[in-house]
Image: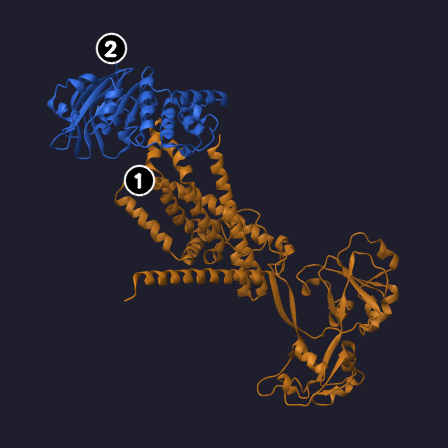
Chain colours: A blue, B orange
Amino acid sequence: MKDNKILFEVENLNLWYGASHALKDVNLKIESNSVTAFIGPSGCGKSTFLRVFNRMNDLIEGVKIQGSIKLNGVDINKDLNPMDLRKQVGMVFQKPNPFPMSIFNNVAYGPRLYKKYSKAEMIEIVEKALTQAALWDEVKDRLDRNGMSLSGGQQQRLCLARTLAVNPEVILMDEPTSALDPISTARIESLITTLKESYTIIIVTHNMQQASRVSDTTAFFLIDENRTGFLVEYGQTNEIFFKPRDKRTEDYISGKFG
Amino acid sequence: MINRNTANDIWIIVIKLLSFLTIFLLALILGYLIFKGLYSSKQTSRTVLNTIESNLDFEVYSSKNSSIKELDWFTLQKMGMGEIKNLRLLTKENVSFELYIEESQISKFASYLNLSEAQLRSHSIKLVNPQEITNYQKESGKILITKKGEKIPNLFKKVKVSDDVLVVNNSVIQTFDNKRITKLDEKQIEKLRNNEISNWSQLNGPDLNALYIPENQINEVGSIEGSYSFAKAISFEKAGNLGITNLETLKVVHIIKGINLTLKYIISPAEESGKFGGIITIIANTIFLVILTIIIAGPLGIGAAIFLVEYAKKGKWTQFIRTGIDLLAGVPSIIFGLFGLIAFVNFLDFSFSLISGSLTMSLMVLPTIIKTSEEALKSVDKELISGSRALGATKIETIWKVVLPSSSKGILSGIILSIGRTVGETAALIFTLGSSTDLAKNIFSSSRSLSMHIYLIITEGLAINDAFSSALLLIVLVLIINISTRKIMEKGQKKNERQ
């Protein structure tokens, strides 16, 4: 492990949807400037766990959390305002969800929530974000066109630009390429590798090859007989894939179930 | 067994027929309303017939901007006697006029009207001389009697004078078999003139021989049963003055065809409770009513919908509220009228006013706005909301910046429905809005809306033609409101999509 600082510290995290125990006793640490992948079979709670990091589960009724998650030492549930948290921890969703506005306004949406910018400042921010998302060249001449008029892959990069515009520390990605074609997928994956230098990325994916391609660390989740998700193994990606410690991990990697 | 394909074809034909029928009926109704609204045919009966040839030895002019085209002898006589000083009985204009006579024509005019010169002069008839006439610059409200063939400035137009009457012996209009004739139509008059009628029974009259008497023997008409004469009105009057009894006139049915809805009518204010003048004040009041209602019910309804969709916890209470809203939507409008009467007019002491009417209408349209807004809000993609929240927006920010703009079309359709309902409502407004035809000065003024106007015209028994022209206007108004609201919203959408 490189000597990076610990960004997130998760201790004994448990989550309930009403009476149903969805996540049990999760413990892990996320380093900054790394890409972490959450893998596991469908329904094992990895997306739920991802949403814990930016408290998007709060939007769902009847969700209860126990345990702690600390971002840079600050408990995100007890000591941090969700809006402030989400400024630092952004999210890209599985299905691209651009707002029905112009491309420009899509990207400008986030920053405008926090501060009033002059037109020149805003243009600069938008250009920077779209460039980082490798979309600038394709849309720079049609920034006032509706965001929904773009292709699927472009829309997802627009959503990425939108997230980048608020300058977060962390980018959460919930199966970001599962709705895209292979070429768009490859572009996003190469973006992840580039962005890692400036951001910390956590990606949920059901595609094991993707996980092995882009991530530094991998967390493998399973669901137990009570339909509760739990963390099986967590470590360096190449170890998980080539020298897993747990037999269940090995079975999953080799495709015995999934 | 009918083959499935044939059954399919039959059903398609049936569906097409039904839809054509519906469209046809709609077009029929609209077409009829447009026709009646634009073109009126008013039936009156009048004593004078249309003059075949004029043998006046003077000329009559009226100010160009009045709508008088013709005058009959009796009216002219009353004008000369000073009994009529306002045009309103002749036209819909509430315009007073002055009678101006050239000095040289006074005696001719007096003898034509069977009046004495002294009578004419004593009724403050204005005398005028020809030079003055040519110097008139602006003109209105004048009836001019001038020398024949004189050059009159373009500010005046010639008026035709009708002075023929059909004089009959009173035996002709007697009651027989529980009926009697008092008027004839143009065709029947024509037949009489052409000597085609030998017996009054041919014209639905009594069984009497129709005997023609020439005008110079008009006095005979008084003594011969079934006799008639086409004479000048003055002859009729003179005969009467001589004491000849049993002389009557048969009226002629006069159909005034004309344009019903004129531009002038639309833009003039209503005067004297709608009897005269135009309709712009009523249109304006209707628009005020709509605006006020939407200002009250719009934010309330949309806010309630936002609460129900985004904030209310699913449970018994929300179900209760929803049921209440549905119930309210089904309440008959007259009950809202009664409620408005008690609550706003009396209890809150707003009296019959715009505000009472708007508050009542707001209650009526609130369920519609809430329901359509709710549907529109619910149909917003949840992913968009997630996306906004994930960027750090609060719930309110998300609603304001993403949810409302996305659901604006649905919300707008609810608003348009409410506008239509407001404009068309009569029962609830009768008890709350008032009935004044003047322009409302503030929200506490009494006023009436366009549909109330139609209702009141018909119940007060005034011209049905006005009802039709008002109805046409109403349809046009609703159309304009719909189109402009849609255009405004589309512009807002486009603006949203740009910078």
**Residue tagged by mark 2?**
A2
Left or right position of A151 against A51? right
Q: Which mark is residue A147?
A: none
For label 1, the crowd category at 10 Å Cα-Cα, with few meaning under 14, some 14 to 19 and many 20 or more, is few
Looking at the rendered image, the quarter that the C terminus of chain A falls into is: top left
Task: For marks 1 and 2, give the one nearer the viewer.
Answer: 2
Examine the rendering and report whether any part of residue A77 can be seen: no
Which one is in front, A37 or B259? A37
Looking at the rendered image, the quarter that the N terminus of chain A falls into is: top left
Q: Position of residue B330 (x, y in %)?
A: 37, 55
Which one is in front, B219 or B258? B258
Residue ID at (28%, 46%): B319
**Residue tagged by mark 1?**
B312
Examine the rendering and report whether any part of residue B423 can be seen: yes
Residue A203 position (above or below residue B15): above
Element under disc 2: loop
Given the image, on which type of amino acid does mark 1 rest? Ala
Given the image, on which type of amino acid does mark 2 rest? Lys
Corner quadrant of residue B164: bottom right
Residue B435 position (above or below residue B114): above
